[in-house]
Every structure is written in structure tokens, then in C-alpha cells.
Amino acid sequence: MIPVDNIVFMKDNFPLLWDAYRETEAKQDSSLAVVEPSRTEGFPTIGINKEGRCYYLHSRYDPLKETQAIVNNVDVQDYEHVIFYGLGLGYHIQAFLNKYPHMSFSIYEPVPEVFNAFMSHFDLSNLDRHRLLHMAVEISEHDPRAFLEQTITQVRKNILFVELPSYKNIFSPQYNSFIKLFTQMVTNRRHSLVTDFAFEKRWIINSLLNFKYVLETPNILAEKADSFQGIPAIIVSAGPSLDYELENLRYIKENDLAYIFSVGSAVNSLLATGIHPHAQCTYDPGADNRRAVFARITEESITEIPLIFGSSVGFEVLRDYPGNKKFHMITSQDTISAFFLKLDDETQLDGVTDAPSIAVVTLQLLHKLGFNPIILVGQNLAYVDNRHYADGIAYADEIKVNTTGDGLIKIKDVEGNDIFTNSGFNQMRLNMEHYINHMDGVRILNTTRGGASIKGTEVKYLNQILEENVLNAPVVDPHWYDMPVTGYDHNYFVKRYRILKKDYEILEPHLQAVLNILNEINALKEKRDYKQLEQCWPRLDKAYGKVRQNRVFKIALRPMNRVAAEALAEQIPLIRFESNPAQKAERIVDLYSRLILGCINDMELLEPVMAELNDLVDVSASTV
């Protein structure tokens, strides 16, 4: 029977979980999990009756000795949060928390019947609620992902996984599925953090410097949304299998059988064989984008290929691109355009969501433009013959790989064979599958020979598509790119800039005020003047509140320092409950300083850009 105090704890702290769990009680198998005495008095174990046998979650002889072995085998160095998978009767959880009182934790129980036993025998008041982030019981198949998304999103530091060892064997299908999902989601988070750290400043600086091009060019989604209903399009990527399809692509282009959109380096392979795509798509914010992708177009002054660019693309590309046919799409990383732009007719601005690859971004674009079917060419997302780029790409030789190396992942190709990929390509594949899953009514054909299997696509090679007359008639409008410059509301832009400029002028003193308080906190910590230290917290909250409400901080400086900002937002609620005042002060100073100093440094980067925006405002004001 569950003690009243435990019921009160759940209702007060996890009411939704408790209500959901109570609804399952009538369906639970009361004979599955049975609490039995062990040979250590006062410390029972749980027997799991399964397939005619009884398996024990804890030792039948000495649960405490077993628990100590579990805790002693865990290396907590470099970790600040732990996920406990499998509760049993909670012995290992209590021992771990006693040994490592600084760590926050979350707990997950895959078996409701075991959770009932845990609730009946473990005193939940022993769990420090300030350290307990999340608790979950697996009631539906969606619970593992929901729990991990919630936990991994909130905890930006390394997460330690501690399972009750018996679960590996007794509940192996659920355990293996959870481990696979956990590994995948942690890997995704690492990629996201690395990407954020690498490009957090470039996304915003690019968006600011590119803003003049956005004002001067058509927004392809505003001008052409749903204009290509039922017309086939091809996304040409730079995978090794592109080499097999160049003649097929030439035939398609010469006979106007589909629109060809080149992404990334694939344009260089096409140009090497005399094929000009109908458009080149780009969104990469990096400075190397110009060299890696556009060097040939720039050096040879190729002006015939229209460019569709994401608004946060590396500004060097737009500055140097020789052609006049440019079209933009607003990307989710561009907070600048979202702040400044509004269409004259009040139509909601549409855009594309940032993704690990330009192919995924282009897939979103073509879907919104109405193309169907969408054909993938050269989308290998894996290694073929120790390489992952097609011929005709200048730097391909530099990155040939040996698939016997470490860090590679074995997956299935389109024909069910084993192939190797890396975590980056695998993330692109999973991201593409995510978007395809939400594209109802669109036929996605994967023609990539030896490429990764992509869920939601139909495998059909390009020669088969031609033989079966999937592409059977001319569909390309030679003037498809004739569209007016998008009519953004220039009066709205001018008003928004003037608001932003006022906030820009007061932001630096507000940042300095926060820094001064942090320096004071640090000095008081060194003097161990904890009484005065307590009086600093409300002052810090008030000073940072002024920064947080500033529009320049919101749309520019915070995104330029998103890793530090997110770490601050996620850790401060936990640090508030730190009982050691010196440690509390040290952690707060560290977290705030990283963000505030980064913002102060970035104010220098914004100064010339704000001057350029001011010139654009003068031009816009004269047209109003």
C-alpha cells in the first residue's frame, strides 16, 4: 500500500504523472512484481514473475552490498546530472545521492508495476526536490522520447546514465530501445551545441549584412508559394552517386522534364560537364562557403544561374556572386528579418527552418512551392568507395576516408546492404526523415545508388524514372524566375529601426551595470561577506532584467551568444537552491560573466553594421 505522504508528494510535485499513473492501476498485473524479503533484514528485494520464472531486481542475499558496488563503479567526473533508469526499491538511487549531493537527477521507470512497489516502500521525502528535475513512468510508447526531450533540453551539461543492472536482462527490449534513443538524442544535442557555438555570431552578422539584399530581391516564398503544383523537381547533391547520373540530368535539362535545383558543391560537378541547374540553393553561414562552393562561378563570372539564398547565408557569397538573378528565403536563424519585415498586404511571412544540410532546407522550400514529385540525386549521406563527394569538386581529394576507422556508423543503404556513415551525415538523414514525415501527399523519390536508406522515400533510380515516363513532358517555364522585388512595408521597417536604435544606445550601460554587480559579488565572496552577498541577488536580477528586455539583446546579442544564454537560463533555477554561498556566488558569476562579457565584445561588431542599417533606413524613409 502506498503511504499517504508519498501520494501527497506526487500530487504536489508531479500531478500529471500521478494522474496518468493512477489511470493504469486497474490494468496492471498484480502478480508481475512481488516484494520479497532478502537475507538482509529490513531490505527486501523485488521478484519479477516472467515466462514461468522469477527474476530479481536486487540481490536476494545482500541488496546493500550490491548497491555499493553499483555506486562505486560509476565515474561521475565531468557530469552534473544523472538519469536513473529503473527504480527497483530505490537503494542505488539513495546511495548515489548521498555520495554525490551536488548532482541534480531525473528518474525513469519503464514498468508501472515496479513503480507501485517503489512507491510502497521508498520514502519520497528522501529525494531532494530541488535536485529532482523530472520523474516519469512508462505508460505509453511515447513516454521515453517525451522524458528524454524534456530532460536533455533542460540540462546542457553532460548527462550520466545509471541503470539498475538487472533491467538489462529482465526488461531488455525496453532497455535497449531506451538506450538507443538516449544515445541518438544526446548525439543530436552535441551536434546542435557545436553548430550553435560555431555559427552563433555568423548567423546574426550575416543576417544584418545581408539585409540590403533581402530588401532588393524577391522573396521566393512570398512570390511563388504553391505556384509549381504537381510539377517535378530534382534536388542534386554532391554525393559520389551523382557521377552516375550526369548524362540523365543532361537529358532532363535539355528536354525541360523537371526543374533542377543544385545544392552545395554539386553545382561544380554539373558545371564540369556543361550542365547549368535551374537554380543554385545555399544557406551555409560559414565564411568558407564562398570558396568551397562558389569559387568556380565567381572566377568564371557565370551569371546565368539564379541563386536562391537563405537570409543568414555567409555574406561573402552575396557580395561576390556574379549573377543578378537572386531570390531569398527567410531562415529561422535570421532574427533580424523577423523583427524588421512585414509585407504591405499583411500576409504572414513564411520561411524555412534551419537544418543540418542545404538539401533538407531545399526540400522544405520545394514542398512549399508545390513541387511534386521531388527527386533526390546524389543524396548518399554515406561513404562510397572511401569517399563522400562526386568528381569535379576541387577539394574532394582532401577528404577521402578509410571506412575501417573509428567513429563510423553502420547503416543500411537503399538496397538493404551495410554501408558506413558518420554522425554528421546520419544526423542529416534523420533530419530529412523528420521533414518528409510531415510532407503529406508528396512523392519523394530517392535515386541515389548506394546511398543511405531514407524513410519516407521511394527508391527508384533515375534511369527507371525516365523509362517509366514519370518525367514525360516539358514542364519548365523559361521565365520562371521573372518576379518582382517583394513589396515589404518600408514604413514599418523605418519605425522598427528607430525603436531598435534607441535600445542600442542604452544597452551598453545596462551591460556594464550587470558586470559591475558581478565584480562586487566576486569581491564579497573572496571576503566571505555572505550577509552583504545576499543583498546582491535582487540587484543582479533587476539589472539583468533591463538587459533581457532590450530589443537589441533579444534579436542580436542573445542569439550571438546563445550557448552562454541558454546555459544561464537553464542553470540559474538550480543554482538558486545551492546552500553553499561561496559556491553559489562562483557559479552565478561564471554563468553571467560568460554571457555579459560576450555581449560587450559583440557590441563592437554591431557598430559598423548599425551604421549600414542606418543608411538603408535613410533610403527607405525617402521612398515612404
Image (cartoon, rainbow, N blue to C red):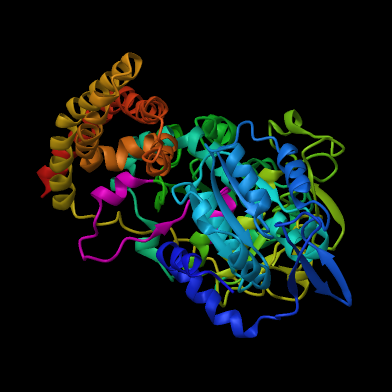
Q: Residue at x 24, y 55 (%)?
A: 488
Q: Position of residue 270 (x, y in %)?
A: 66, 46
Q: Position of residue 107 (x, y in %)?
A: 59, 56
Q: Position of residue 505 (x, y in %)?
A: 15, 30
| Front residue of this view, candidates 60 and 555 | 60
4 sits left or right of 277 in the view: left
Q: Residue at x 71, y 52 (%)?
A: 163
Report the span colored magenta.
Answer: 334-363
Q: Residue at x 59, y 60 (%)?
A: 122
Q: Residue at x 75, y 79 (%)?
A: 31
Vertical placement of 346 versus 519: above or below? Answer: below
Q: Residue furthest front?
A: 41
- Label total for image: 0
| Quadrant, the N terminus | bottom right
Question: Which of the 4 image quarters holds residue 531?
Answer: top left
Asked whether 344 falls inside the magenta stretch, the response is yes
Vertical placement of 328 versus 557: above or below? Answer: below
| Front residue of this view, candidates 349 and 461 | 349
